[in-house]
Amino acid sequence: MQNKVQIQNFDQNDWISISKIYKEGINTGIATFETEIPDWNQWDHSHISSCRLKAVRNTKIVGWAALSPTSKRKVYTGVAEVSIYITSKRRNIGVGKLLLEKLIFESEKGGFWTLQASIFTKNKASIGLHKSLGFREIGYREKIGKLHDIWHDNVILERRSKNIL
């Protein structure tokens, strides 16, 4: 399967497919506190312009990953938060691992020394994926936010670059 999936950069032209996969993640109730898909301009403004990746299989986008800044302060320019979403039709077959491996590689090439992820505790697959690629659990946020009037906890993970530090 892995040799059939290509990891490529994405841009505004891919937004319709990317946003549909994002909507699938929203619908799971364990991927994000967001409840609405932003338009391209909103999404573009809130994410780092480099390290925007799509997974393509048989000409269809089946997943995506991107980085967003953790702070506007200059001292944190090498720290970013990971977003990764896989279409429901292609989960648990290695697409996420391919995307996250490439995201790690591209982030280090771009000078990022720390990647962070804040993941719903119920999202065991995502936690496992991140840990399998060197992320470590550094914290836990109890009842950090409500989604549809239900409190949710998050696990905080980070990956420190061995190449930059």
Image (cartoon, rainbow, N blue to C red):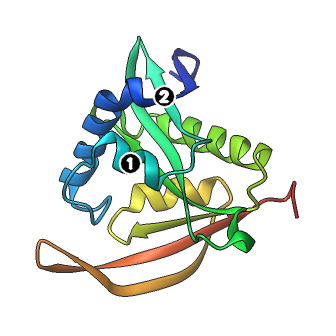
Say few, some or many: other residues with alpha carbon within 10 Å of mark 1 (under 14 / 14 to 19 / 20 or more).
some
Looking at the figure, which quarter contains the C terminus? bottom right
Q: Is residue 58 left or right of residue 32?
A: right
- Which is more foreground, mark 2 or mark 1? 1
Report which residue position mark 2 lands on: 55
Classify mark 1: helix, strand or loop. helix
| Left or right placement of residue 39 versus residue 13 in this view | left
Comes first in the chain, label 2 or label 1 = 1
The residue type indicated by label 1 comes to Trp
Residue 72 appears in the figure? yes
The residue depicted at 61 percent of the width and 54 percent of the height is 132
Measured as percent of width and height from the top left, residue 38 is found at 27, 49
Viewer can see residue 88: no
Give residue 43's mark. Answer: 1
The residue shown at (50%, 58%) is 128
Q: Residue furthest bottom?
A: 142
